[in-house]
């Protein structure tokens, strides 16, 4: 009874207070609604994050991912496919994907695999091929309702989804999968989808034309193959083709005209991965922000000065220090942005 009486007293006082409040408090309901929600738009520059940054955390569900985002202090995100698609009911993989990435990465780097590891990788790839066919069939018939529900869940928490990156846009994906990916992105409320540049003009033409059909922009990500004119062919093919620039990889490739590239392509950049890497002469390392050669602060100031609207997307790729975790490191990256834009 005491607790109920206290609640009623406080509620009455609260109502009376609002009734007598000055005019500037007329927006109180919206203020209350947005209380304690993240806001990572800093002095005119939207800072976001790609959920790949949280890849090492054990729970990759959409709900857990949302908590990682909000705990990091972020209000905008480039969403990888797994959290959204698992939320929407996509079949779970039947093989160890982490093992596949580890062994496949070692093979690509030219490292020697033991006979057992080679056999294991071959079995994983066989299982992955069967799984890909199962996923393609699921995608062709997937409902968009769960993606709309996820969009609302994120929006209610103060997080907007500006880009979607499922594994649905590759050269081995069906047209039905590509269409699904674009429709899912629209249901999530994004302005564009992202993918690694396929280095295939026919495929960028196809994606651009499908983007026109479904009203969805396609932004191509690059690694160290990025050059000043890397995207020119794709841009000429379709008004829906665009850039998902990666500033760190561009510096690691040895280029020194990053700011000029951004100024040239600013209308075509839909999002920009932000990380600190070293130049080739310094080892090309992915390093803690502020200790490498990537002019992150200068880029952010350029965005602020020229009022560019595309987000700077934190991508955590450096080794998480012992005793820390990805959320804490993303928080540090966000603080670096705040200081740069003060």
Image: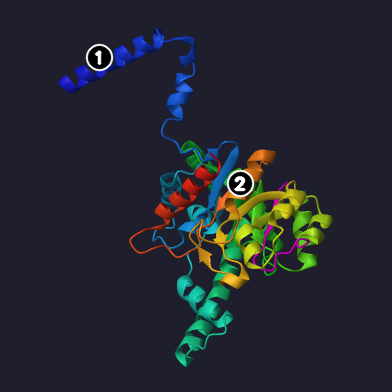
| Residue situated in front as seen by the camera: 79 or 331 | 331
Q: Please identify the residue farthest to the top as the structure is shown.
A: 20
- Real-space Cα distance between discs 2 and 1? 49 Å
**Between marks 2 and 1 in the image, the one whose residue lies nearer the viewer:** 2
* Residue at far left of view: 2
Asked whether residue 293 appears in the rendered view, the answer is yes
Screen quadrant of the N terminus: top left
Boundaries of the magenta span: 215-230
In which image quadrant can residue 196 be found? bottom right
Q: Is residue 221 magenta?
A: yes
Q: Position of residue 137 (x, y in %)?
A: 60, 63
Q: Tag 2: Cα neighbours inside 10 Å, few (<14), some, or many (≥20)? A: many
Residue 106 drawn above or below residue 114: above
Residue 194: image x %, image y %? 64, 56
Residue 129's quadrant in the figure? bottom right
- Name the main secondary structure of what is drawn in magenta: loop
Look at the numbered discs 2 and 1 and tell me whether their residues touch, using CB distance below 8 Å.
no
Lower position in the chain sequence, tag 2 or tag 1: 1
- Whether residue 1 appears in this view of the structure is no
Q: Closest to the observer: 121 or 77? A: 77
Residue drawn at x 55%, y 80% as measured from the top left: 126
Q: Is residue 310 left or right of residue 87?
A: right
- What residue is disc 2 on? 300
Residue tagged 1: 9
Q: Is residue 171 magenta?
A: no
The crowd level at tag 1 (other Cα within 10 Å; few <14, some 14-19, many 20+) is: few
Residue at 55% across, 45% down: 47
Secondary structure beneath dot 2 equals helix
Q: Position of residue 37 (x, y in %)?
A: 44, 36
- On screen, residue 39 versus residue 279, left or right, reads left
Front residue of this view, candidates 296 and 72: 296
Seen at 57% across and 84% down, the residue is 110
């Amino acid at each position: 009874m005491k607790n109920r009486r206290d609640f009623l007293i406080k509620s009455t006082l609260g109502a009376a207070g609002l009734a007598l409040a000055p005019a500037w408090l007329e927006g109180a309901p919206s203020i209350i609604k947005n209380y304690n929600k993240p806001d990572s738009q800093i002095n005119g520059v939207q800072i976001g994050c790609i959920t790949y940054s949280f890849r090492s955390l054990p729970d990759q569900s959409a709900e857990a991912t949302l908590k990682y985002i909000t705990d990091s202090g972020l209000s905008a995100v480039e969403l990888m496919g797994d959290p959204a698609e698992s939320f929407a009911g996509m079949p779970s993989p039947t093989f160890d994907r982490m093992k596949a990435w580890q062994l496949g990465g070692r093979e690509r780097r030219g490292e020697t695999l033991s006979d057992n590891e080679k056999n294991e990788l071959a079995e994983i790839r066989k299982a992955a091929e069967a799984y890909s066919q199962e996923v393609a069939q699921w995608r062709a018939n997937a409902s968009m309702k769960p993606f709309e529900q996820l969009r609302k869940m994120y929006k209610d928490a103060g997080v907007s989804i500006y880009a979607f990156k499922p594994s649905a846009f590759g050269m081995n994906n069906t047209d039905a999968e590509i269409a699904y990916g674009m429709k899912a992105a629209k249901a999530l409320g994004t302005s564009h989808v992202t993918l690694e540049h396929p280095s295939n003009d026919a495929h960028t033409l196809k994606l651009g034309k499908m983007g026109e059909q479904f009203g969805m922009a396609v932004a191509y990500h690059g690694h160290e193959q990025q050059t000043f004119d890397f995207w020119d062919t794709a841009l000429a093919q379709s008004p829906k083709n665009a850039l998902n620039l990666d500033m760190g990889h561009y510096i690691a490739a040895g280029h020194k005209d990053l700011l000029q590239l951004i100024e040239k392509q600013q209308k075509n950049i839909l999002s920009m991965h932000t990380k600190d890497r070293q130049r080739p002469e310094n080892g090309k390392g992915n390093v803690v922000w502020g200790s490498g050669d990537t002019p992150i602060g200068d880029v952010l100031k350029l965005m602020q000065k020229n009022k560019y609207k595309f987000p700077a997307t934190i991508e955590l790729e450096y080794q998480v220090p012992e005793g820390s975790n990805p959320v804490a490191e993303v928080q540090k990256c966000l603080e670096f942005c705040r200081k740069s834009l003060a």
